[in-house]
Image (cartoon, grey):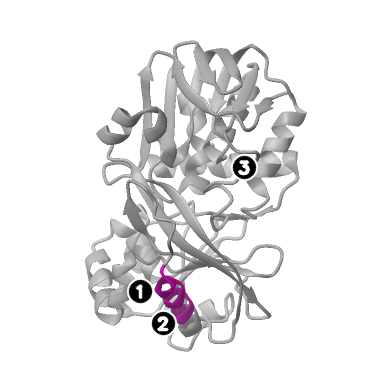
Amino acid sequence: MKIPENVDVLVVGSGIVGLAHAYEAWRQGARVAVVDAAATVHGASVRNFGHACITPQAGAASSFAEVARTRWLELAGKAGFFARESGTTVVARRPEEIALLEQFAAGRDDVELLDRAGVGRIVDVAEDALGGAFLPRDLQVDPREAAPAIARWLESVGVAFLWRATVASVATGTAYTSRGEISAERIVVCVNHDVDRLFPDLAEQYEVTRCRLHMLKVSGGPARPRTPVLTGWSLLRYAGFAGCPASADVRDALSRALPAGIEYDLNQMYTSPPDGTVIVGDTHARAVDAAPFQPWEGFDLLLDETRRLFPRLTLDIVETWQGVYATSPRTEFLIAEPIRDVHVVTVTTGIGMTTGLGIAPSVLS
């Protein structure tokens, strides 16, 4: 589709955060266009687990996640992609992890604590699992399918998409692209870790860099997990878990048990998409530029820990890949208006699929 010369809202970037803003603007009756340098959605929005991890969030992330949950189910119905209210199973293998989950669950009705038998009824894990928790409000989508399906549906209802068009700069009312100028009353820049390409000072102010991940997919087989699975390593990552008093004890226990897990900043988690495979991940390494070289030791670490947790899972490697997303030690979200009527929105941690669809209403209100 040819981009109109004038639109009400121009979105730069076709990842899930950009698509969320295009959808919100369309819902408000605006004339909307999306510009992306790639030929299709191919960044962090398709390289992840497809897990909307609603329950373990805190603060603004929790509020965004709740809105995103509704939007995921709404858009799945409109755009026809796989989405299910799967819930999440958290597997605890150490007393410290059990203690943290008990603290997290206290006073909440959206967390079901599980004993060993309860975990075993949901996922086929090793005998050393002590128990865990079930988070029934979490969702799962197919990451390869969801964002591209949303883009196709948005285009079908009148949102204009201009692919393979690089935005060189933006100003109030105008975006300067490699395919010409586009006028817009409001511009929303959602380019994830590439925010430093357009707004280097803003990226430096928020200390935004790139986080590089080891990701892989294995064949799975009959023992593949029925729900997304989090582990003790996940308890260190999501703010709702990490804010519990027992978090320090969990970190100490994991550090003693697996120093390499700390070195690689492991978040051992799993999802099983509709094709029957299992997505396994992930590690984290941060730098201004994400080095393209992946030490195989990171994949070995993930596979070794997967064997220990899922001894009956088939671990034939189907694919490996590098994930990259924006990260910041200062905030989970960069939401700013550095130029009048030009908004910059980036999720600066690994919860873009969880929260991304929920940010746009507050930005475009």
Sequence order check: which comes first, mark 1 or mark 3? 3
In whole angstroms, how far apart are the C-alphas of marks 1 and 3?
39 Å
**Image-quadrant location for residue 101:** bottom left
| Residue that carries the numbered disc 2 in the rendered image | 130
Compared with residue 39, is residue 297 higher up or lower down, i.e. above or below? below
Question: Where residue 29 sits in the image (x, y, percent)?
Answer: 65, 17
Q: Residues within 10 Å of mark 3 (few under 14, many from 20)?
A: many
Sequence order check: which comes first, mark 2 or mark 3? 3
| Residue that carries the numbered disc 1 in the rendered image | 98
| Residue that carries the numbered disc 3 in the rendered image | 41
Question: Where residue 261 sits in the image (x, y, percent)?
Answer: 33, 72
Name which residue type carries label 1. Ile
Question: Where residue 327 sits in the image (x, y, percent)?
Answer: 36, 46
* Majority secondary structure of magenta residues: helix
Residue 299 lies within the magenta run: yes
Q: Residues within 10 Å of mark 2 (few under 14, many from 20)?
A: some
Query: Residue 73 vs residue 350: left or right?
Result: right
In whole angstroms, how far apart are the C-alphas of marks 2 and 3?
40 Å
Name which residue type carries label 2. Leu
Residue at the image point whose x is 57% and y is 34% from the top: 37
Residue 316 lies within the magenta run: no
Q: What residue span does the magenta drawing correspond to?
A: 295-305
User: Would residue 31 be visible to someone looking at this image?
Assistant: yes
Residue 207, disc: none
The answer to whether the residue labelled 1 contacts the one labelled 2, judged by CB atoms less than 8 Å apart, is yes
Q: Residues within 10 Å of mark 1 (few under 14, many from 20)?
A: many
The answer to whether the residue labelled 1 contacts the one labelled 3, judged by CB atoms less than 8 Å apart, is no
